[in-house]
Amino acid sequence: MLPKLLLPLVKYFSALNVFRYLTFRSAYAAVTALLCSFLLGPIVIRWLKILKFGQSIRDDGPESHMQKKGTPTMGGILILVSVVVATLLWSDLSNMQVWIVVFVMVGFGLVGFMDDWLKIKLKTSDGLSAKSKLIGQFLVSAIAVIILYVFRSNETTLLYIPFIKNAVLDLGVFWVPVAIVYVMAWSNAVNLTDGLDGLAIGLVILSVIAFSILTYITGRADWSSYLNIPYIKNAGELTVVTLALMGACIGFLWFNAHPAEIFMGDVGSLSLGGVLAVLALIVKKEVLLFIIGGVFVLEEASVIIQVFYFKITKGKRVFKMAPLHHHFELSGWDEAKVVTRFWILGGLFTIIALTTLKIQ
C-alpha cells in the first residue's frame, strides 16, 4: 500500500525512492509487526481476560500444567493482526503469492478461532470435532493449492530434494492432492507442538528466519542461479510477509515466554503451520521444510507412533506421553529446559537446512 501511494511522489521527494527496495520494505514490515505486537499485546490480554477466554487444560496432562488453567488463549489473533497490517502497508499488493499466504493465514486462523471458541464455551479441552476441523483445514488448503496450480509456473509441480541439483519428479496433476495433504499435515504439526510456554512460537521464528532467506534468494535470478536452486518469479516479495511474521512472532513471544501471560491457541498454531507449508510450496522447498521444521516433525511423529503402538499392543505406550515435549516433562525435565533444548535443536535443524543450499 505505502509503495503504491508514495512512489509517484519520487519526482518531488527523491528520498521516497527507498520504497522501491525490497530489503527496506521487508525490514520495516518486521518493525511494524513487532510494534503492533508490543502495543496491542497488553490490550488483547486484558480484553481476553474480561471476556474470560481462558485456556482449558487436559485432565491427563502433566500436573504442573494445571496452574495454567484460565490463562488467556486465542492470542494468535495478535499475530494475525500484526502480520496482516504490516503486509498491507509494506508489500506489493499486486503480487498474487502474497495474497495466497495471507489467505492461508487468515483461513486457518478462522478454523482455529472456531475451535478455540468452542473450547471456551464448553469449558473443555475439546473444541471442534475432528471431522469438522479437518473439513475446515481441507477447504482452506484446497483453495490455496488449486489457485497455485491454476496459475502454475513450470516449477510448480516439480519436486526438489536437498543435495540434488535437478528436480527428481514431476507430480503433474497429482501435485494438487499431495499439496493439500501437505499443508494440512504441517498445520497440525505446529498445533501439536504448541504445548509449552514459548515452545512453538520460538520454533516458528527460527523457521521463518530460514524462509526469509529462501524467499529472497529464490526471487532473485542471479542468486538462485549461483546456488543452483529454482528461480520463482516474484517470490522475493514474500520476504516482506516472512519478516512481518518474524516481527509479530517475536512480539508475541514477549508475552508467551514462561510463565506465559497468553497462549496462541489454535487460531495461532494452525495458521502458522499452514503458512510455513504454503511458503514451502511456493518456493519449492517442500522437502527442505522437513529439515527446517525438524522438531515439528518429531512432535507429530511421536503422536502417530504413540497412537499406532497403543492400538496394536492394546494399551502399551512408547512414550510416557505424547507429543514428545510432554514425554520429557514426565521424565523430570522442567518446562524451561524442554523449551530451551528444543529451541537449540530447532536452530541446528535450521542451520543444516540452509547449508544444503550450496551443497548440491
Image (cartoon, rainbow, N blue to C red):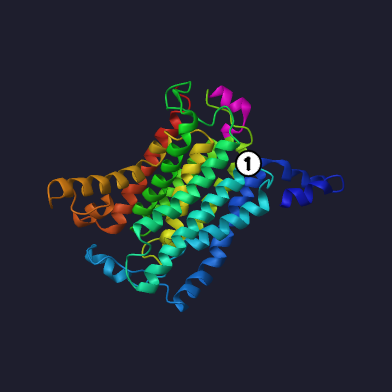
Q: Residue at x 49, y 38 (%)?
A: 280
Instruction: Choose between 264 and 9: the one closer to the eye.
Output: 264
Apparent side of residue 262 relative to residue 212 in the rendered image (left or right): left
Where is residue 252? Give x, y as percent.
Answer: 48, 59
Instruction: Write down the residue under mark 1.
Output: 237
Where is residue 358? Give x, y as percent.
Answer: 48, 25
Residue 226 is one of the magenta-drawn residues: yes
SS under mark 1: helix
Q: Residue at x 66, y 41 (%)?
A: 22
Where is residue 49? Give x, y as percent.
Answer: 44, 76
Apparent side of residue 32 relative to residue 118 in the rendered image (left or right): right
Residue 100 is one of the magenta-drawn residues: no
Find the magenta span and give its range.
217-227
**Is residue 262 shown to the viewer in this render?**
no
Where is residue 235? Give x, y as percent.
Answer: 60, 37
- Which three-letter amino acid code belongs to the residue tagged 1? Glu
Looking at the image, is 313 positioned above or below residue 61?
A: above
Instruction: Choose between 96 and 253: the one closer to the eye.
Output: 96
